[in-house]
Image (spheres, grey):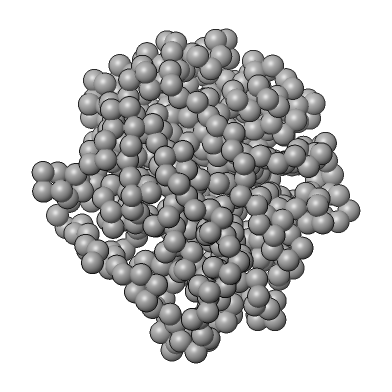
Amino acid sequence: MLKIIRYNTLVILSVLFLFSCKTEKHQFKNSASKAEIADKAMIVSARSEASRIGAEIMKKGGNAFDAMVATEMALAVSYPFAGNLGGGGFMVYRTADGEVGTLDYREKAPLASSKNMYLDENGEVISEKSTMGALASGVPGTIAGIFKVHKKFGSLPIQELLKPVIALAEKGIVVTQKQQDRLQKYRDVLMQVNEDTILFTKSYKAGDTLKNKALANTLRRIATNGRSEFYGGETGKILLNFLQERGGIITEQDLLKYDAKWRDPVQVQYKDYQIISMPPPSSGGIVLAQILKMIEPYPLNEYAHNSAKYIQVLTEAERRAYADRSFYLGDSDFYEVPQDSLLDSNYLEAKMANFSFEQATSSSAINHGELSNFYESNETTHYSIVDAEGNAVSVTTTLNGAYGSKLYIPELGFFMNNEMNDFSLKPGVPNMFGLIGAEANAIAPEKRMLSSMTPTIIEKDNKLWMVVGSPGGSTIITSVLQTFLNVAEFDLNMQEAVSAKRFHHQWLPDEIMMEPAGFEEKALEELQQKGYKINQSESRIIGKVDAIRVLPNGKLEGGADPRGDDTAVGF
Ligand code: DON
């Protein structure tokens, strides 16, 4: 029997953190439906500055991988909420000649970490230890990631790629309304964790310019000295001193040993489409593939979009796939993930065998467990790129929570991640996304924490068809799923598919989380009659998808999520 987590026993900081994790108010127009169209190349990211820099690099003759390097860093400057040097991420790519692969630059647990490091003497989780401050961070992977990409695929010198980014940090970004709101919302907790004011605790108003000279200097040193500047040079030393003075356990050895890894993607066929997505340490590819295989036999396009029947089929498949996630998935370098068995069609067919349209399956019939609420949010960031040659890059990068561990290194100009919370801190106890885990995702030195990030590329008739991904913790996978289905099954254009309302089920808690306003009352009533619990109690957004589709005429169609400041730039 799983334990019910008792949030009321957590210390005040933890409560503050959880509040800080709740989603932003739902504030996007329902009407965003006109897709940006480009002839040759396109990039869609969380900030217009980052999209513009990526597009400029491609205009200058750089490829999608060059654009990835510049965009990843431009997001660290313009979107410090999630863009980062102190975090990690995943890239899925498909080259113009059809070669596919993935890069894992996920953070790793420090060498001095241990399985029970976030438990108190009674064996209870001290949750703020894994979410805030120096102990919450895994060893960052982002700089290793961009250099690995550049070495294999880059065509322009790194200095040229970082030049516009350094200029952006120096000249400053223009604060948007959403950014003003976020900074205001997190100001107190940022002050608390940093025990001081930092660049981001000033009172910014929309339209203000925010310059980050320290980050410009860090990037300049990285441009000059390369990857080792971060994993051994001055930047690395400043980072280590800063963390160690605050109780962190990351050492020089950790930085020296860190490396990003090329991994084979998870691939699955769904009707005419080939889905190419992220393998462990992300759960994204496997869970997405499981859901797709479970729903494939149902004639989804005969049900109305977001009708009760459609929601039911997806929910039941999601429930079953997320139950597997919590038991079987973890870093495959440390734990033998039974990927083939999990994707076996007989196995998946058998899993759906007890589903009936008459009545909701209870999650307790799938497995035991009682859980508290989960806290979904959109603090990761995804960007999609297609260049003029047809190379495609799908990247999701993260600090985990908003501004990660909240710990900001003033001398370096960036925040550190709180990715350690993505481990299963104790079997059966939910993390900040309500996800529970088992031995497969227990902490071990150098292990990577299980992720839900699902950067994905989709082929149709062996040709590049879509590049898609999202932030949103546990809701990432279902956001990617619905965006794909919106186009493949319901013929929405890329922008409509991204803008459409989303819902989510993750086995536990046993409820369908739904974005408010936009689902038909009739569908909701029907679902409730069949025993589904609907959670629409709060204004929430689910995912923040940035995607590109290749149209039959070869043009590129962008979908930038109106839930954020996301922007498609093409030429
Ligand atoms: O890797 C993961 O699954 C999480 N660290 C992602 C966090 C995220 O998406 C935050 N935003 N909601």
- Across and down, in percent, residue 471 comes to 51, 49
Compared to residue 295, the image places residue 568 above or below, namely above
- Where residue 565 sits in the image (x, y, percent)? 56, 47
Task: Report whether residue 409 is seen.
Answer: yes
Q: Quadrant of the N terminus?
A: bottom left
Residue 269's image quarter?
A: bottom right
**486 to 22, vertically: above or below:** below
Give the number of callouts: 0
As displayed, is residue 442 above or below residue 202?
A: below
Q: Nearer the viewer, residue 100 or 141?
A: 100
Residue 182 screen position, x and y as percent = 41, 45
Picture quadrant where residue 138 is located: top left
- The residue at 42%/10% (across/down) is 234
Q: Residue drawn 24% across and 46% down? A: 127
Q: Is residue 435 left or right of residue 568?
A: left
Q: Residue at x 50, y 81 (%)?
A: 355
Left or right of residue 519, residue 199 in this image: left
The quarter of the picture where the C terminus appears is top right
Residue 469 location, x and y as percent? 59, 50
